[in-house]
Image (cartoon, rainbow, N blue to C red):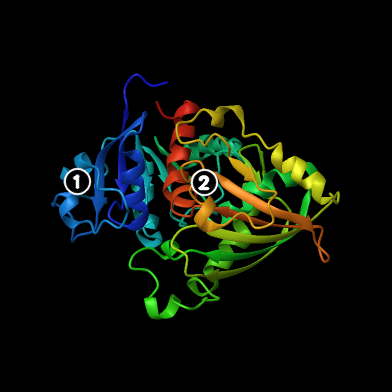
Amino acid sequence: MLHKRLPVAILGATGAVGQRMVQLLADHPWFEIAVLTGSDRTIGHPYGGVVRWILDTPIPERAAKMIVQPTEIVADVAIALSALPTDVAREAEPLWAARTAVCSNASAYRTVADVPLIIPEVNPDQLALIERQRAERGWQGCLVTNPNCATISAVMPLKPLHDAFGLQKVHISTLQAVSGAGYPGVASLDIIDNIIPNIADGGEEAKIESEPRKLLGRVVEGRVIEAQIAISAQVTRVPIIDGHTALIAASFAQKPSPEEALAVLEGFTPPEIVRHLPSSPEQALIVHRASDRPQPRRDRDAGRGMSASVGRVRACPVLDVRMVALSHNTIRGAAGGAILNAELLVASGIVS
């Protein structure tokens, strides 16, 4: 699609999500890493010398030699991928968005009215908010966000069911991997032989209860009309390295049978503009009929970590349908999700 790869900055490149971005962009057909930013401790040093690399693959050689730059200085790039902590993102991302397109994994602006919150397979129409965003803020660039890593696990299967049957109520309980806490993350004495029934003092549950309504909403005259869905969430941290599992029970305006729900899930097809993006998996939503799937160890890497999985679709004695969903939290739910949003900006002609 592109004759020349576009220069990209990774903001917060030394953290866990930033490292995933570096890894995923090493051989990307559309994007080339041009700038890596970091904290005061790392600025001015080669990336390979200051990053505590935690991934299984080696640091890409070219990235290892790059000098880490300050986040506060906006570089001349086509896209900035943000892996910044929320408090830093709140200050830095608007500076970058004034000049370039920012695809953020941070939560700082997800719920802001003129900021698209996007899963490309679910709601690419929210890109329409960018016109309003630029007009009201005077930006030449834009700011697009991807949702919480656990939200993605739940919303991928809920999207086609909502379209078919009208989602009304949903309860989501999560089993979230330790990599979601970053590095060094949860203390070993806290998580080994244990489950922790709270993440971010309830902040994680608040995200899961609010973000799906925006993701499943409608864009009307440059604004999102949120879906009127009652959502209750309970989150736990479990001793799994990667892969967030969501246990879902839902009720609908038109109650489906389990087989009707399965047929809709198996027939889910992403929008045409999304299907051929470089990071799009061959199958966005993998439906399992085996009674013991999906499982983190067996299913998190499906579609190079970009596919979501769903299984155990069955009747619910309290609501209508229940199921188990899973996705890779640092790829699909974080770095890969931000990169897919960047690809969508290019495919839509917003970035060229």
Which quadrant of the view contains residue 285? Answer: top right
Q: Is residue 320 left or right of residue 351?
A: right
Which comes sooner in the sequence, label 1 or label 2?
1
Percent position (x, y) of residue 310?
64, 50
Q: Are marks 1 and 2 in contact (CB under 8 Å)?
A: no
Percent position (x, y) of residue 175?
56, 66
Q: Which mark is residue 64?
A: 1
Residue 216: tell me if it is visible. no
Measured Cα–Cα span from mark 1 to mark 2: 33 Å
Q: Nearer the viewer, residue 203 or 155?
A: 155
Percent position (x, y) of residue 153?
58, 53
Residue 304: tell me if it is visible. yes
Q: According to the image, label 2 marks what residue?
A: 115
Residue that lies at the very extreme toward the bottom in this rendered image:
189
The residue depicted at 57 percent of the width and 52 percent of the height is 152
Percent position (x, y) of residue 233?
64, 66
* Kind of residue at badge 2: Val
Q: Is residue 323 above or below residue 165?
A: below
The residue depicted at 37 percent of the width and 29 percent of the height is 30
Within 10 angstroms of label 1, few (less than 14), some, or many (20 or more) residues?
A: some
Which quadrant of the view contains residue 61? Answer: top left
Q: Is residue 150 left or right of residue 141?
A: right
Which quarter shows the C terminus?
top left
* Kind of residue at badge 1: Ala
Q: Secondary structure at mark 1?
A: helix
Q: Is residue 211 above or below residue 195?
A: above
Q: Nearer the viewer, residue 182 or 36?
A: 182
Q: Nearer the viewer, residue 16 or 34?
A: 16
Q: Is residue 330 left or right of residue 311?
A: left
